[in-house]
Amino acid sequence: MTLHVLERLAATNPDSEIWWDSSPLVYPGWKADFLKGAPAGKREIWTDQLTRLFDADAAQDGVMGFRGVTTNPPLSLQAIQADPDFWMAEIRRIAAERSTRDVETVYWALYLEIVRRGARMIAPVYEKSGGKYGFLSGQVDPRLVSNGRRMLEQGLELAALGPNVMVKIPGSEAGYQVIEELTARGISTNNTTSFTVAQYIACMNAVSRGRKRARAAGINLARWRSVITHMSARLGNVGDLKAQADARGIALSPEDVLHGELAVMKRAYHLGKRQGHPSKMLQCSMRVVDPGPDHAASSWHIAKLAGGDFVYTCPPGYIAQLMQVEDRLPPFDPAAIDEEAPSDVLDRLMRIPYFRQAYEPDGMKPEEFSQFGAFVATAAEFAGATRKTVDFVARAVEQSERRAA
């Protein structure tokens, strides 16, 4: 058996986990499309690898290579776009059952249905593992990052869909208040739109307060989980790092940026380990660097974390990139997690206010989290995808009204 790149990564620490970063509803179609372009000598091997990672029939028996699933508004939009006729019909059904033409109401009901179907697909994995694996993350509306009351309402609706639904909450000041409240009720959470050590500390503190309240209320936390997402490449590429470096005449190579992204993740990881905190760090927004067929390829976002017990959530495109360069990737070093960024690189990065905000434990106050460059850009992207989904719902409702006229 030839191990997949991600299986080799997971082998560097028995507690590490590989997750699928998209709805499980789209996996069969993506797998089939990807394998159409597989080289003849790879097709059988790749088919076996992708089947081990996820097979809908095997998942119903509680067997899945992926340990969990993450979704967000752009990824849910992909699920709709993969089968628009089916979801158009679902929208009309939802509108009729609820006797409403309110597009936002129908949209949220549709999103809940997407999450419910995905969670149901992998629920046997959750049961077979005793609640350790088989979670699916459903995200509250990203347009609500400062509205704690509405995020809590939506979080409770998501959690009610099934015991294996983990609620994704943004790393805003209001978001951490919601994480505390959900934790106090024994509900598993995924802290998203998070980039900085200060946010990760705020999340750990919120989780600790929530767990204390849960225990005091006699709530069973045996099947509760918390993950804290580090959006690596977004930290270095969609925020203010490069602009602030240029403004100060500081030259940063692509490797310097990667070192910075990883330094933030490692600082939070080791801090949590020293505290024995139950939250687990989740790495997402990874990239592959491929200089060409005659050169070694790399993905530092996973290679430099090898040996740690992280969750790595991987979207379809990233998995495809890894497989296409698998023969040119160096082997994983289980000691990589303990490597530090070169001191000269860290010195340069620390001259940039944006990086200091991300790296220092006291780099930001909670009220500043939602003003951080990477947060602003990512939240805007997620909100844009949500608006596109809402418009898809609006068109379906309009079509239904025209048919009825």
Image (cartoon, helix red, strand yellow):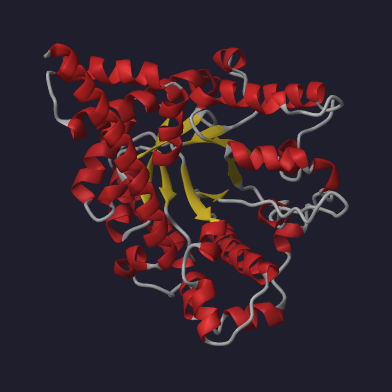
At horizontal 27% and vertical 56% (from top left) the residue drawn is 174
The image shows residue 169, relative to residue 95, as above or below, that is below
Q: Nearer the viewer, residue 5 or 96?
A: 96
Quadrant of residue 161 within the rendered picture: top left
Q: Position of residue 30 (x, y in %)?
A: 59, 27
In the foreground, 80 or 193 = 80
Work out whether residue 356 can be spotted: yes
- In percent of the image, x 35 and y 37: which residue is there? 186
Q: Position of residue 103 (x, y in %)?
A: 19, 31
Name of the residue lying farthest toward the bottom: 249
What is the number of callouts on the image?
A: 0
- Could you tell me residue 172's position as x and y percent? 33, 58
Where residue 327 appears, as percent x and y from the top left, is 85, 42
Q: Quadrant of the C terminus?
A: top left
Q: Is residue 359 above or below residue 48?
A: below
Decide which of 376, 118 is in the foreground and name it. Answer: 376
Q: Would residue 13 appear left or right of 25 to someone viewing this image?
A: right
Figure quadrant of residue 232: bottom right
> Residue at 61% of width from left, 31% of height from top?
66
* Quarter of the N terminus within the rendering: top right
Is the residue 373 above or below the residue 293 in the image? Answer: below
User: Residue visible at 45% across and 37% down?
Assistant: 75
Instruction: Tell me if residue 160 can be seen.
Output: no
Quadrant of the image occupied by residue 206: bottom left
